[in-house]
Each structure stands twice: as structure tokens, then as C-alpha cells.
Image: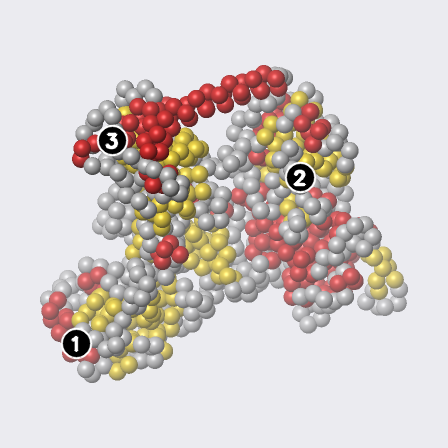
Amino acid sequence: MSVALPTTLVVVGLLALLSACRSVATTVTLSPGQVLAGDDTLVSNNSKFTLGFFKAPDGAAAGAPDRWYLGIWFTAVPDRATVWVANGANPIIDADAGSPQLTVSGDGDLAVVNHATKSVTWSARSAHNNTPAAANTSTTTAIAVLLDSGNLVLLDVSNSSSNSSAAAPGRTLWQSFDHPTDTLLPSAKLGLNKATGVSTRLVSRRSSATPSLGRYCFEVDPGAPQLVLKLCGDSSVSVTYWATGAWNGRYFGNIPELAGDVPNFHLAFVDDAREEYLQFNVTTEATVTRNFVDVTGQNKHQVWLGASKGWLTLYAGPKAQCDVYAACGPFTVCSYTAVQPCSCMKGFSVRSPMDWEQGDRTGGCVRDAPLDCSAGNSNGSSAPSSTDGFFPMPSIGLPDNGRTLQNVRSSAECSTACLNNCSCTAYSYGGSQGCQVWQDGLLNAKQPQSNGGDSVSDVETLYLRLAAREFQTSGGGRKRGVIVGAVAGACTAALVLLVLATALIIRRRKKTKNDRGAAAGGGGLTAFSYRELRSATKNFSEKLGQGGFGAVFKGQLRDSTAVAVKRLDGSFQGEKQFRAEVSSIGVIQHVNLVRLVGFCCEGESRFLVYEHMPNRSLDIHLFQSGGGGGVFLDWGTRYQIAVGVARGLSYLHDGCRDRIIHCDVKPENILLGASLLPKIADFGMAKFVGRDFSRVLTTVRGTKGYLAPEWISGTAVTPKVDVYSYGMVLLELVSGRRNAAGEEYRTTSGSEEELAFFPMKAARELVKGPGVVSVSSLLDDKLCGDADLVEVERACKVACWCIQDDEADRPTMAEVVQVLEGVLDCDMPPLPRLLATIFGRPHSSTEHQTTTVSDTSTSSGPFTSGSQN
């Protein structure tokens, strides 16, 4: 059994070593007698990770000295994206005497030593209450190694003939993977050892610039097969505010982004009698990825995109910043829709502007003026003598920890009760709680979305207590505070009654049996009357186009908002079914999906009201530019349209509560915004598929030239029909012409002309192989060869992969997005049977694929960098 040496002896031993230590530059291992200091680093054999010292500002005050930290970071990622920090809780203050040093002691301990004071500020043993080595360990047998996984380990190599390799055999004395900070790396475990009770968890950083411990942690839930985010840190109260949802064997219930097959990424969750832990792995070592708790209190999983020099977020939980507990700190309001979600309440200012700028808003805001409160008016007298007033904040999700006062029958009484208590900072009157008062700091006040799309409950008017001077205008006295405090509640109550009476009158005038009622769960959609839509569209006079479900007209609402009104022709849906389906559509929001504004259901009339897209549909620009009112689309714009459409379809297939199959993907249903941002339209009346089902039987839908083969056979369809249609659209983005229109070009013999289906031509060029392929011949002539040919070839390969005859051979839209974004490489897919027959090539679902490791339940795609486990 290992025995710890007395701390004094350890320190003395370490300091004695310093006099004889020699420095190292860039290496893989650190042995006794060597020192890591200054710019010295340990670099893993694969050069993926670097261990070294770095400086960070204190963050508490401007001009404060920098602090030294020992950390591990991704070598290839700029701005030092650290994945582990040793001494986050005990940094070394910058001093002129010299930098800190890292050394390995003779008894197998790893320590950070302050060179100026000759004291040990961090060691593996003391920091983690661990005894990594036996007392009689030789001074030459322990080495520190940075492995290719990013794991810093102490190895006892007493029985090894070599200690210079990162893979040197030996007994592990200690490893950083057992003590993560804010980041979980592939192959590391995050969880609970049920036998010992030892738990590992992730704890957020204090701010983006300061790696000291923050307030949020991510850990397994011992009571359920899931992980949870909590408010922890130095808080005496542990609050759970988000959970991943139960593990179902493949993914967590509240992370639908991982429901699809994610190439190069394998997620595992183990919950047995011995332990419960989360672990993920990648099948390609070069993939730079991380799971971490951000300073914002969100758990995120990201992949580094080297080509674009940025992080791609696979998921973030919770999705909304305002769903993080106390994300903005006391006396703030968190907005679901603002670019900067946190803002101070009236009469308050940011407590620490520096922390605020670095992402740490948990300090919240402080008063600009003190309240007027003394012992004389704090003992419950009926007539408050305070000059403080109340500022009404309407439609606010009320803060936490409000206290309900009994036997208070009016807003004025509630106001008086708050003024009589020096610690009372706000009150609210109304709803099921009656009079509620808050003391001290106000946490978790939220500004809901205007369309009601969030889940904020208890939305009322909050009356914020402020000093009298906050209500004064120039030259005004302090009397207004008393007046506002005494009558604000009564005035508000009278105003509410007036509004209710007006609303009742208007409602009666609107008549018609429940036509103005909002659909249950409709996500804040507006229920328009037929008269309103007829007026908005000038009696349906300006027709924008004809879709698969009916004509579309341009309209303008009373607030000058431009909309597109779709009249659904031949709809046989009953009112109840129509409203239920519209309700499901209303909660679907994605940057690449056209937003549904409202609907109309009057008699036999059915209308959908969408946001207006000023640049109309893709086909106008792609096929009619120069003569049909379209604009020229350069290759960069076309490629971004392809990526955007793929993201939108991926969301419909895997990101919604109910999986949605569009069923009619074509250029006419891809609309372009003011900046040519693509948005998918006509998904509203598509086919909803419950997540418990993989396919659905439906009547044939879609457009000739984009229909997948399974439509013709009459079998049940899956989201792969959209993948096929997307592949056909992608080829049209490359060629600039309809696939079915045909094109004349020379055969390989050069002796004759033939009329060819463009997908056949694309496949012919691609199968020639590396060094021969001429993708420039596939490009739209209007581009004049001005395009990134690597992207063109990638797009053509993805398109040919999408139009496979067998749906099992097609990718998911999530895979398409990753290939187009450069996360994965795509080799030449097998030829579809039709094309293979024409070219005399045998069909094979594995032809031209590199070696992959795939799940037995899914078909693996043609990745050169490997597929998912």
C-alpha cells in the first residue's frame, strides 16, 4: 500500500532538486532532474496537444498583475483553447523574480513550484488528495508523459528499458483524465464510481480569460441514467437547471442532435453495478473535438474546422442562454431574443464591467442610488415613511424565491407591505399567487419571447423598488416616489380592467365560432381572419407563385410587415386536424426554414401566412438569370446555399420534436432572403413522422425529376427521399440548368454527339479517378470557370452519393452537412444501378469505399477519414 511522505519532506526534496535541475525545450516526457519553465513545453507524439505554462489576467481589476497557470491546450487551435488546467484555484502571481516551474519528484509526485518563493503551489498529490507512488519509489523511475489523447500521466517505469517514448510501458501513478476541469476529451470518462463514491465532473471557468473555477458544473445524475447541469462552485445552494434526458442506448432524450448517425463520433453511456459514466470516442485521431462547460453555464460539444478556422457546435444544452440558472446574476433581466441576453434593471449598473466583457455575468448589477430605509420604518407601521417608489416592469418572468403574503387584498396593500420592509426589493400582485415580495437580490427575471415560443411561466408585472431620485426629472422633488409607490398598483389594476373590457368588446365584434382562437400549443402564431388576409393581399391581387399546395400571394400587415400568404387548394383536412398540424409547424424555428407567422381557418378556407422572402425562389436565379428577373449567383453563393439547405433539412429530420419529411425538395421551394440566405419553404404540409418510427406510408408527393425510386415502387418512405431530391438540386446548382433538360457533349471517342442526363455526365467525370477528373467541365458556363474546384468536386460526389438507388446507401443530411463543411472527406460513392448499367460498371454498396468501422444497424458512407462506430 502506498504511503504519503510528510509534506515538509516533499517540499524540501523538490527544492533540493531545483538546484540541479536542467531545463527542457519541447519534448514528450519530463523526468526527475528536468524542469519545465518559461516557454518550455511538452508536446504529444501526434503534435495534437501541448502542455506548458501560460499567463492570464486576474479579471478582478484593471491593471492587476497577470497570473501563471499550468495547462494543456490544442496545438493547432489559435488563442490557446485549453482542455485542462492544473492550478486554476491557486495561480502564481506574476513576479520579476522568475516564472513558475514544473518538476517530477523522486517519490512520483508532479509539482508546480514558484521559482520566486521556492514554494510548491500545486502538486498532483495534494491537489487531489492522492498518493500516487510508494514511499520507497526510486528517484529515477517516475516520468511525466503527455499522451496522444491529451492525457497527462505519471508513469512508474522501473521495469521499463526505455522512458523516452510517449507510449512507454509502466504503472500509471496519476493521470489528468481522472481530474478534468471544464473539458472532456475523447476516451476520458465523466462519471461516478459506485463502489468508492468518487465522482468526476466538469466545472466551468470563471470567465473566457480567467481559468479559475466558475459556478457551473456538469455531472452524472445518480438517480437516473443521464447527466445534469448544476449551479455549484462556491454557492451554498446546488440547483439543477438542465438534464440531458434519459439514455436510450444510442443518445440522450434532450439532445436530438445526436439522434442521427454522426460520422467520426461515437457516444457511450455506461450505467452498471460498478460505475456510471459518459464517454465519447472519435474514429479519426486527427479530429479536434471537445465537450465542455462554457462560462455561460451551457454544456457544448464542438468540432474544430481547420479550413474555416472556427468551432462547429454539434449541440448546446440548454439551447437558450436564459434557461441557465442565474446566468445574468442579480438585478438583471435575461432576454430570449436579444443579441446580448443580459441587461441591468432600471436604476442598476454592471457590478464588474471587466468580468461582464469576458462572459462572466454572474456578478449581476448593483444599485445606482441607495434606498431610503431606516429602522424607524421597518417594523410594520401601516403608513410607510420611505420615499422609495416602484418602477413597473410588465410582462416579466418573475424572479425566483418570491414569498407570498397572506391576507393582502390589493396591489396597494402589497406595495405598502414591501415599503415597510427594508430588505424588500420588489413585489408583484396578481395571478394565482396574489401578493409576492422579494428580498435582497432578484435572480432569474426573464423577458419572454414576443411570440410566446419559450417556456417562461409566471409572467406578470414586477414592481421594482427604487430610490426616489430614479423617478426625478431635472429640478423635481422627492415626493413623486411616495406617490408612485402608493398608487402604482391601483392605477395598473384600473388599466388592466379597461384593457379587458376593450378586449371583450373587440372579441364580440369579431364574431365567428372560435376562428380567432389560437391553436393549442401554436407557438405564438397569429390567427388571422379571412377579411384581414383579403385586405392585406389587396384581394389576392399580387400572385408570387404557385406551389404544390396552392397559390402564394404577397401581402402587407397593418404594422407594415411584408408576408407571403399561401392559399391551400383542395384541402380535405378538418379544422381540428389543420389547427393541430399548424401548431406543430409553429414551434419549428431554424435559420434555414421559412418562418410561419400565422394562419387562417374560416369555413372551408385554409391559409398559411409566412415571412416574405424578397429574392423569391432559387429557380428564378439559377435558371432564368439575365432574362427572368434573377440575379447572378457566383460559385461561393451557390455553395453556401447548398450548405444552408442541407442544414435546414438536417434540422427537419433530426432536430424537431417530430421528424419531418419535406417530400418536395426542389429549387422552387428554396427561397432566398435579402442577403441570399437560403430558406426551405413548403415544409408546412409535409409528412410528420413520430420519433418511434423510421418510415411512413403515404401517397406519392413531389415533382418529376426529383422523386426518389421508392416513391415509384409504392413502399413506405423515410427521410432519405429528401436526401435524393437534395442530391438532384445540388447537381443543378453545379450545372446551372435543369437535370432533365439534357445537354449535348462529346463521348470519350469524340466521334459523335449524344443527349445525356446531366447526373450521368457528372458521374462519368467523377469515376475517371484522381488526376483525370475534370470537374470544370461540369460547371455552369455562366461561371466562366471561376469556382473552387475542390468544392465543386466535393459537391458532385455528395450529389452522386445522395442519388443512390437504395436508400440505405444514401447519407443522412447530418452527414451531408459535415462533408460540405469539410469536417469529413468523401470518396467516390458507388454508381447508382441505372448509371452503372449505362457505363457497364457493377453495382456495389461498398465500391470505392475505404475501410470504415460502422454501426451494425446503419449503412456506412464513403468517408476517406472513417465512419462512426
Residue sitting at x 69%, y 32%: 536
Q: Residue at x 71, y 29 (%)?
A: 535
Q: Position of residue 148 (x, y in %)?
A: 39, 68
Closest to the observer, 230 or 865: 230
- Residue drawn at x 81%, y 50% is 628
2 or 3: tag closer to the N-terminus:
3
- Checking the image for residue 562, the label placed there is 2
Q: As displayed, is residue 220 above or below residue 97?
A: above
Q: Is residue 401 left or right of residue 764?
A: left
Front residue of 256/406: it is 406
**Label 3 sits on residue:** 385
- Seen from the viewer's position, the closer of residues 499 and 793 is 499
- Residue 493 seen in the figure: yes
The amino acid type found where label 3 is placed reads Ser
Query: Could you tell me which quadrant the N terminus lies in?
Result: bottom left
Q: Mark 2 or mark 3: which is in front?
A: 3
How far apart, in angstroms, are the residues tagged by discs 1 and 2? 74 Å
Number of labelled discs? 3
